[in-house]
Image: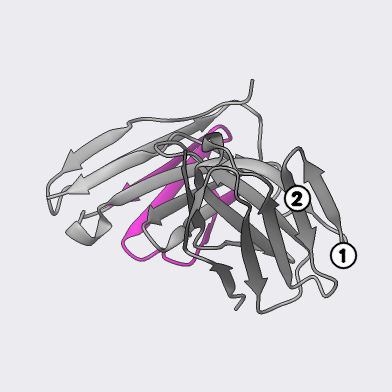
Amino acid sequence: DVKVTQSSRYLVKRTGEKVFLECVQDMDHENMFWYRQDPGLGLRLIYFSYDVKMKEKGDIPEGYSVSREKKERFSLILESASTNQTSMYLCASSFGISSYEQYFGPGTRLTVT
Amino acid sequence: GQQVMQIPQYQHVQEGEDFTTYCNSSTTLSNIQWYKQRPGGHPVFLIQLVKSGEVKKQKRLTFQFGEAKKNSSLHITATQTTDVGTYFCAAADNNDMRFGAGTRLTVKP
């Protein structure tokens, strides 16, 4: 059974804190993605990675960075959390960038106060 | 860049009624995928359409890809309470994929 796991389901952080969200997949997928989901805006791509140590900006990368040191792990970093980064964060993995289905993790609901 | 519009944003139906959500792209697509997200859950892949004019069925769900490969629809016949959730299209254009904003379906028993 394919699995994408995320480090936390719920997280509360203060403005200015550094925040790490981790994602692990067990399917040996090359591609991993970070999205944020907000009501009425759907899923917006923050960053994706197509290989270890490789990363590409998505539509809304500002205020975020990522790290992929191992194939199975993709981390999203908020260097200095702000209240407008309060959102649901979803990680996904796939064999391809656009031609294969994406498998999503359960999501992390981040609240920045 | 590619723009993906999905309508309607919300749809409330009586159980047994039909439901349709539409996805429109500003560019010609290589494929389109559909996902369902149950309340409190995460998006789960339903299907992928690749060919112009393609129609695929999964029980009460019918998926269509437009002839020009710029639009798609998902139709549910005789909705059930288990159909509640948000349905997303994901439009792929070369090596780029964009999700629509989703259509949230509620079903009144």
Distance, label 2 to label 1, CA atoms, is 13 Å
Quick one: SS at disc 1?
A: loop
Q: Amino acid at mark 1?
A: Gly
Mark 1 belongs to chain: B
Q: Residue at x 52, y 66 (%)?
A: B8
Q: From this viewpoint, is residue A97 visible?
A: no
Neighbor class of circle 2 (other Cα within 10 Å; few <14, some 14-19, many 20+) is some
Q: Residue at x 62, y 25 (%)?
A: A2
Question: Looking at the picture, does residue A61 appear above or below residue B3?
Answer: above
Residue beneath disc 2? B62
Residue beneath disc 1? B53
Mark 2 belongs to chain: B
Q: Which residues are magenta?
A: A49-78
Neighbor class of circle 1 (other Cα within 10 Å; few <14, some 14-19, many 20+) is some
x%, y% of residue A60?
A: 42, 65
x%, y% of residue B69?
A: 80, 70
Earlier-in-chain disc, 2 versus 1: 1
Name the residue nearer the viewer: B9 or A19. B9
Q: Is residue B92 left or right of residue B37?
A: right
Quick one: SS at disc 2?
A: strand
